[in-house]
Image: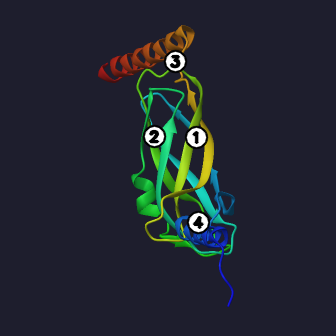
Amino acid sequence: MKTIHASTLLKATLVLFLLTVMPLGVRADSTQLTLSPVTGTAGEDVTVFGTITNTGTVDIFLNAETFSLGSSSLLNGDVTDFFDNAPLSLTGGANSNLIALFSLDIAPGTAPGVYSENLLQLLGGPGVLDLNDIADADFSVTVEGTAVPEPGTIGLIALGLAGVMLLRRRRLDFVTR
């Protein structure tokens, strides 16, 4: 009869432990997250669209998303769109098509410019309750300035309105004679 050495038993126990603790079948690089460009103006609520693609062969559950807005306290987000639009799971090779993933509120008074260092994380895995980080996407928010008419433009508009009123007054004088 063979005897089992303590070191062999310890190795086997360690392997079994690691197999039960480690998530099965999903790697972070088996899911791709692609976002559309994000552009808006100060005081506007913008919706961010994107596509989720399962490039692996194992079905994955899309359980949550989270994001960090590292570049500015002038942006505020809401993940409700993800829960309303994302499929519960994606089979291997499938994608979500273009869907609304989250919305951003750009605070009034936000200066025009590009606000970067923002990160969207997709959480899920092979199980319904898994919250592994399965995909990340860095994104920037471009805040555009609002158009302010030049003083010359305002003067031309005022001159045009004065001309219209003058013509209308002359027409009324002509009719009353």
Query: How much space separates mark 1 and mark 3, taking CA atoms?
Result: 22 Å
Q: How crowded is mark 3: few (under 14 residues within 10 Å), some or many (20 or more)?
A: few
Q: Can residue 126 be seen in this view?
A: yes
Q: Mark 4 points at which residue?
A: 18
- Which numbered tag is attached to residue 38? 1
- Which numbered tag is attached to residue 148? 3
Question: Which amino acid type is marked by label 2?
Answer: Leu
Q: Position of residue 29 (x, y in %)?
A: 69, 58
Q: How crowded is mark 2: few (under 14 residues within 10 Å), some or many (20 or more)?
A: some
176 vs 30, left or right, is left
Question: Which amino acid type is marked by label 4?
Answer: Leu
Q: Position of residue 31 (x, y in %)?
A: 64, 61
Q: Mark 2 points at which residue?
A: 104
Say whether disc 1 or disc 3 marks the residue closer to the N-terminus. 1
**Residue at 46% across / 13% down in the picture?**
158
Q: How crowded is mark 4: few (under 14 residues within 10 Å), some or many (20 or more)?
A: few
Q: Position of residue 146 (x, y in %)?
A: 52, 24
Quadrant including the C terminus? top left
**Which residue is nearer to you in this view: 34 or 6?**
6
Question: Which amino acid type is marked by label 1?
Answer: Val
Establish if 145 lies above or below 60. above
Residue depth check, mark 4 versus mark 3: number of the one nearer the observer: 4
Q: Residue 57 falls in which quadrant of the image?
A: bottom right
Say whether disc 2 or disc 1 marks the residue closer to the N-terminus. 1
